[in-house]
Amino acid sequence: MIRVSGLEAAYINNNTLIPALGEVSFTLERGQTCAIIGPSGCGKSTLLYILAGLLKPLAGDVVISGEPVRPKRKETALILQDYGLLPWKTALANTTLGLEIRGYSVKEALEGAREAMTDLGIWEFRRHYPAQLSGGQRQRVAIARSLTLKPDLFLMDEPFSSLDALTRESLQKTLLDFWKKKNSTMVLVTHSIEEAVFLGQKILIFTSGPGRILQTVENYGMGDAGYRTRPQFYERCSMVRGIIEGGL
Amino acid sequence: MGSGRSKQLPADYAVAIIFLLALWEITSLLLNRPYFPGPYASLLVFFHEMAKYLWAHLLVSTARVVVSLAAALVPAVILGMVLGREQRLDRYASPLIYLSYPVPKIIFLPLVITLLGLGELSKIFLISVIVFFQILVTTRDASRQVSKSMVDSVISLGAGQLQIYRHVIYPACLPKILTALRISLGTAIAVLFFSETIASRGGIGGIGYYLMEAWARMEWDTMFAAIIAMGIMGFALYMFLEWLEKRTCPWEFL
Ligand SMILES: Nc1ncnc2c1ncn2[C@@H]1O[C@H](COP(=O)(O)OP(=O)(O)OP(=O)(O)O)[C@@H](O)[C@H]1O
Ligand SMILES: [Mg+2]
């Protein structure tokens, strides 16, 4: 599904090149989930932006579903930590926005939004503005919006980092359920080791910036809601923590 | 989330109006001069004058302000939104704006009259130019501040340039545009008054003209009737803009 090889990225500021990502290669099969974790500033968001086609790499190849990455690939959904929702649109209008932009009729957009919002338990909040929603509800609206587009690839940049622990765990579970039901590919950037181990079949651990992949952990056993309470889960968490601390 | 805006009730306005009228009455009593009549006498003359010609002057003046604001608003908003997003264009435009913004453009009034004559065009042009810069600068700054991730997430939904403007930039700027418009309203009325007193040919010259005529004839009551008319115009337009903001930016009043 995703093949990244020899990827390098940099930003240009005042004519100087600021490296953000150095030599990253990995592959992800269709239907797999992948968690990316690493120190702040190592280029995780940069990688996600490149996968979304919003940023051009300096070098290397990115192939998604057999085609070179390009902006506005219809089946890619991007969910950001904040600001994904427009404060001037109600929850419903935010959810229909994707379909509206892609030229679906009002009726189709409404139908799609109703289905996704009902699935996520936020249909009753459809007339609320984002400012009138809790953090968890807001993130559910953002997820609902991407679901309306029937994506096969979810890119998420710290989607739950501003939420309290309970809301966070409940949304992680929601996401897991969706992944199992729809079998879509997911790339999740996170700062939380527990989240990475709970949601990532594959865990990419990055070095500090410009980031490279320090180690890839195959997280066997992930994928069921009870995983969080198993000894195996704790072992995997401390293993990941060990790798991160060792790499710094 | 509360944006800290106070919600005025009609009763609050009534109290404020009574207070201002009382202040006026007291000042008038204390001064005790023919050129400073009290509110009662002035209001009587106001209604009397409105029934004669004042309403026509009021209408003309209001139309001038409204047309000038509208004429400035559309290009200022479009240009401001684009400059806020296109840094390359803004590099050329910014110095121009910074150089011309602080110049009091009212000093061009004689030149504008010479070029465009004493008719409507010169007044509307001058008000529009002044208000244009105020709205342009506000809109450009608002457009610059639109968060990049908000734009990115809409691009990732497949939005093109026009859709970015429609769904993100324009609504993000709208509350600030309306605030700029409210502030510009005061400027617009001041410039209107000035240009009506200077550039009028007689006839229905507008309230500024009407007021200066009354002043010249030392008809103090009539002069105060014109002041009341000008005040009512400003208040009505201001209230209209408030209403417009409530209508178009409901998310600002949660
Ligand atoms: N627009 C930009 N212009 C210049 N440099 C940038 C820009 N965005 C990011 N960078 C730099 O690129 C590097 C990687 O940034 P990135 O946002 O990808 O990090 P990150 O891993 O997502 O960090 P965090 O965990 O804090 O979100 C950082 O050193 C950052 O300073
Ligand atoms: Mg980041």
Image (spheres, coloured by chain):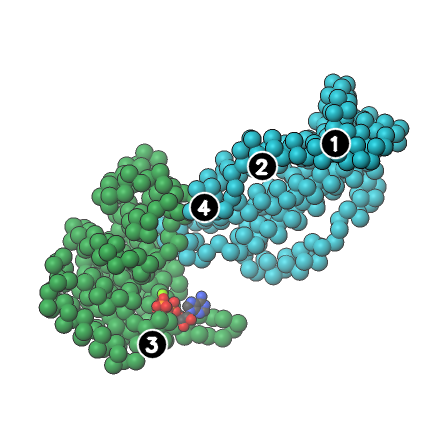
- Of badges 1 and 3, nearer the viewer stands 1
Is ligand 1 within 8 Å of the beta carbon of the residue shown at mark 3?
no
**Chain name for mark 2:** B
Q: Nearer the viewer, mark 1 or mark 2?
A: 1
Q: Is residue B168 left or right of residue A32?
A: right
The residue positioned 26% from the left and 61% from the top of the image is: A187
In the figure, is residue A70 to the left or right of A177? right
Task: Label 1: state its secondary structure.
Answer: helix
Which colour is chain A painted? green
Closer to viewer: mark 2 or mark 3: 2
Q: With respect to residue B26, does B143 lie above or below?
A: below
Residue in the foreground of this view, choosing between A110 and B213 = B213
Question: Which circle's residue, 1 or 2, is located before the other in the chain?
Answer: 1
Tag 1 residue: B25
Q: Residue B226's spot in the image, x, y percent? A: 76, 29
Mark 2 and 3 residues: CB-CB less than 8 Å, in contact? no
Amino acid found under the numbered disc labelled 2? Leu
Q: Where ligand 2 lies, by quadrant?
A: bottom left
Circles 1, 3 touching at the beta carbon (< 8 Å): no
Mark linked to residue B2 = 4
Q: Secondary structure at mark 3?
A: loop
- Disc 1 crowd, CA 10 A, few/some/many (<14, 14-19, 20+): some
Q: Which mark is residue B241?
A: 2
Mark 4 → mark 1, Cα distance in angstroms? 39 Å
Q: Mark 4 is on which residue type?
A: Gly
Instruction: Please name the amino acid that badge 3 sits on.
Output: Ser
Q: Which residue is mark 3?
A: A208
Q: Does A53 appear above or below B157?
A: below
